[in-house]
Amino acid sequence: MTQVAGKTFAEKIAQAQDFLPINGTDYIEFYVGNAKQAAHYYKTAFGFQNLAYAGPETGVRDRASYVLQQGKIRLVLTTALNSDHVISEHVKKHGDGVKILALWVDDAYSAYEETTKRGGKSYMEPTTITDEFGEVRMSGIYTYGETVHMFIERKNYNGAFMPGYQKWENNYNPADCGLLYIDHCVGNVGWNRMLPTVQWYEEVMGFVNILSFDDKQINTEYSALMSKVMSNGNGFSKFPINEPAEGKKKSQIEEYLDFYEGEGVQHIAVATKDIVKTVTELKSRGVEFLSAPPEAYYEMLPERVGSIDEDIKKLQSLGILVDRDEEGYLLQIFTKPVEDRPTLFFEIIERHGAQSFGAGNFKALFESIEREQAKRGNL
């Protein structure tokens, strides 16, 4: 199924099948080398708050997990407690990275049945876990690489997070940075793997392709890539998929695949209502962003995107990018990778009606990424 020209995003996503109702992102789980230190980083740098903990103290003997929350965003940071654990193997191969993209559903058992009968590969058969706060039903299937979609049903649960976790409290609670919810999560796949992945989302998950970009649209002097955006029927879950394309030098997607040693989540886009305030706060806490585009980019903004509410000089001082589609405009900025391997990074996005993904910024963004690649010797 391809993008249908001339239709609004609402009309496009309405073409998605409805056998898998999704209410949004439930949580994103990272497998990391040291969850305690990673949790401190996300609290300090990004303003996440304590939510829940599981580990030896709660009866979990093989791993430790810290759950953080900001707005509707929940991050789970998990570390194995011995070297021969599957989580240790994941971290050894990929470094710190996203393992689970958990989706909030009304019926986790039905979600599993509907997706596996359409070809989804099982990760976790339907399971119910309980404690004094109620029950959580869950199941899971593999998507690209070793990444997993968990289906989480929690309508009969009122605890901190889920059974096996206890409320996590301490005296270190930095203020939040205005992050609200997950806007989208982008996956990088290997050569000639985008179309099969798109087909998988269509057939197994019932998603629809709402946007497509080829290497003629996403390219610089040195590199290129292709991208397709997959969405569920209400637009609450969007997963753009990137594939490298031939260029003079190594693309950012190839660099990711080399250092992640496989396919995986490239970046997590989080929404804010005041990107200037959020980015100013994040920078003050040490979060590093890609370098700003040249001055000419901002001189051309009024002509390219028309009238916007924000002060362009302020956007320029922070390196925030602006783009417009037929339904409005958006503001966005991208962090540098948050690990030593040049893999996972974050996007901060503020939407004013626009439902697209900043196609007009691709060239400026990727040239900025290439400058960082060149510093690492990977371009």
Image (tube, rainbow, N blue to C red):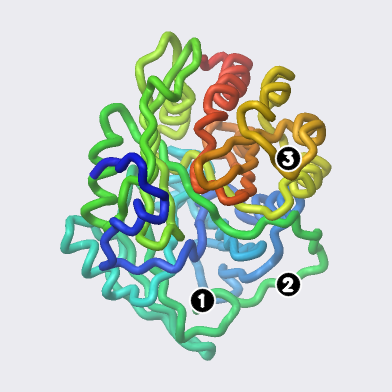
Q: Nearer the viewer, mark 3 or mark 2?
A: 3
Question: What amino acid does circle 2 point to?
Answer: Glu
Which residue lies at the image location 26% right of the left edge and 68% below the top edge? 19
Q: Position of residue 22 (x, y in %)?
A: 39, 66
Looking at the image, do the residues carrying marks 3 and 1 touch, with CB atoms under 8 Å apart?
A: no
Q: Position of residue 364 (x, y in %)?
A: 59, 23
Answer yes or no: is residue 353 visible. yes
Question: What amino acid does circle 3 point to?
Answer: Val
Crowding at dot 1, Cα within 10 Å, few <14 / some 14-19 / many 20+, comes out as many
Residue that badge 2 annotates: 169
Residue that badge 3 annotates: 287
Crowding at dot 2, Cα within 10 Å, few <14 / some 14-19 / many 20+, comes out as few
Looking at the image, residue 367 sits to the left or right of residue 12; the answer is right
Task: Give me the C-alpha separation between circle 3 and circle 2.
Answer: 24 Å
Where is residue 140, by image quadrant? bottom left
Question: What amino acid does circle 1 point to?
Answer: Met
Residue that badge 1 annotates: 162
Give the camera-side residue of 367 and 234.
Answer: 234
